[in-house]
């Protein structure tokens, strides 16, 4: 096992220039904004989404910031998605420096009536697909001797969701908790390779995911200590930090980005 290098604090610790970063769920919301942030920071971004038209529109906007951008139109939960994403990263920059498992779905399920189909779909997209993508990129990162996986969890992994007031989202909360737990375990497995895995747990973020109950989401704003609803831009700095040398000694962690919301629980 090689000894972990000490960060060069006289360089730009947060530099992600030229890093190849795959971001799932990149056609809108958090994934799109992360793509924008990484492209602006000089990274080569592979945008992944199942909505091919919206993805292409988004890719064109990102390409105006940084021409080194690729796109993979796929459902992340189908068996060949992982291979396509790795291939696209290699085509763009010859390696995979960072995978951001962001694609996900929300639910409004009730524990008394949730169907097997609803539960299976949630697990398939929000947990199994990230696991499959990690399985594909981790050996590549191990060969490179470096890499960073960032899994997008949720504050609702450690608490009931605000929508749970009516019994909703139980499978969502459970899948996000499992993803954060998997991140911790995999980080331990991979530590000797210096490949790192961490999670970001956002609070409620004002994205299209909440379009049909936005008023309810915004009601929640008054409980956020920093005084504003989370927007996708609030997550970019943490993601760049976790992808960069600045976080070289950080693995297996979940960083909560929620304006201090959990403090008041
Ligand atoms: N918005 C929030 O309040 C919030 C809070 C915590 C965590 N998150 C998590 O952040 C992630 C992004 O959320 P968002 O608010 O940007 O959502 P969003 O619904 O606005 O965007 C999600 C994107 O993922 C894509 N997608 C969904 N399923 C996919 C699949 N199977 N394969 C490929 N692409 C798929 C969609 O087409 C869409 O472009 C999700 O994992 C979500 O659970 C969101």
Image (spheres, grey):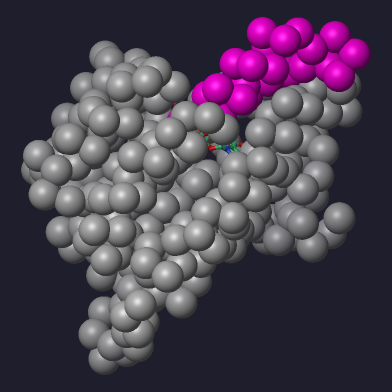
Placement of 262 over or under 205, stated as above or below = below
Along the horizontal axis of the image, is 29 left or right of 219?
left
Residue 54 visible within the image: no
> How many marks do you count on the picture?
0
Residue 12 within the segment the image draws in magenta? no
Along the horizontal axis of the image, is 102 left or right of 170?
left
Q: Quadrant of the C terminus?
A: bottom right
Quadrant of the rendered image containing residue 195: bottom left
In the current view of this chain or complex, which residue is farthest to the front? 1
Q: Nearer the viewer, residue 253 or 135?
A: 135
Q: Position of residue 231 (x, y in %)?
A: 53, 45
Residue 123 visible within the image: yes
Q: Quadrant of the N terminus?
A: bottom left
Along the horizontal axis of the image, is 140 left or right of 241?
left
Residue at 74% over, 18% down: 108
Residue at 58% over, 63% down: 253
Q: Nearer the viewer, residue 82 or 69?
A: 82
Along the horizontal axis of the image, is 86 left or right of 240?
left
Q: Nearer the viewer, residue 48 or 60?
A: 48
User: Where does the magenta region start and end?
Assistant: 103-126
Residue 125 within the segment the image draws in magenta? yes
């Amino acid at each position: 096992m090689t000894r972990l290098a000490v960060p060069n604090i006289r360089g730009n610790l947060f530099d992600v220039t030229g890093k190849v970063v795959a971001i799932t769920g990149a056609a809108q919301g958090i994934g799109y904004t992360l793509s924008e942030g990484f492209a602006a920071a000089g990274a080569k971004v592979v945008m992944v989404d199942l909505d091919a038209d919206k993805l292409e529109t988004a890719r064109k906007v990102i390409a105006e910031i940084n021409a080194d951008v690729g796109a993979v139109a796929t459902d992340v939960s189908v068996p060949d998605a992982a291979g396509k994403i790795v291939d696209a990263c290699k085509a763009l920059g010859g390696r995979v420096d960072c995978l951001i498992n962001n694609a996900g779905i929300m639910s409004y399920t009730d524990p008394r009536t949730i169907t097997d189909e609803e539960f299976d779909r949630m697990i398939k997209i929000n947990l199994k697909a990230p696991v499959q993508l990690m399985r594909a990129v981790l050996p590549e990162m191990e060969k490179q001797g470096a890499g960073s996986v960032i899994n997008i969890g949720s504050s609702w992994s450690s608490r009931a969701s605000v929508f749970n007031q009516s019994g909703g989202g139980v499978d969502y909360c459970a899948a996000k908790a499992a993803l954060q737990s998997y991140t911790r375990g995999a980080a331990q497995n991979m530590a000797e390779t210096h490949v790192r895995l961490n999670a970001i747990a956002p609070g409620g973020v004002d994205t299209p995911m909440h379009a049909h109950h936005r008023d309810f989401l915004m009601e929640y704003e008054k409980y956020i200590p920093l005084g504003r609803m989370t927007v996708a831009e609030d997550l970019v700095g943490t993601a760049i930090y976790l992808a960069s040398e600045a976080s070289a000694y950080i693995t297996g962690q979940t960083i909560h980005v929620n304006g201090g919301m959990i403090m008041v629980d």
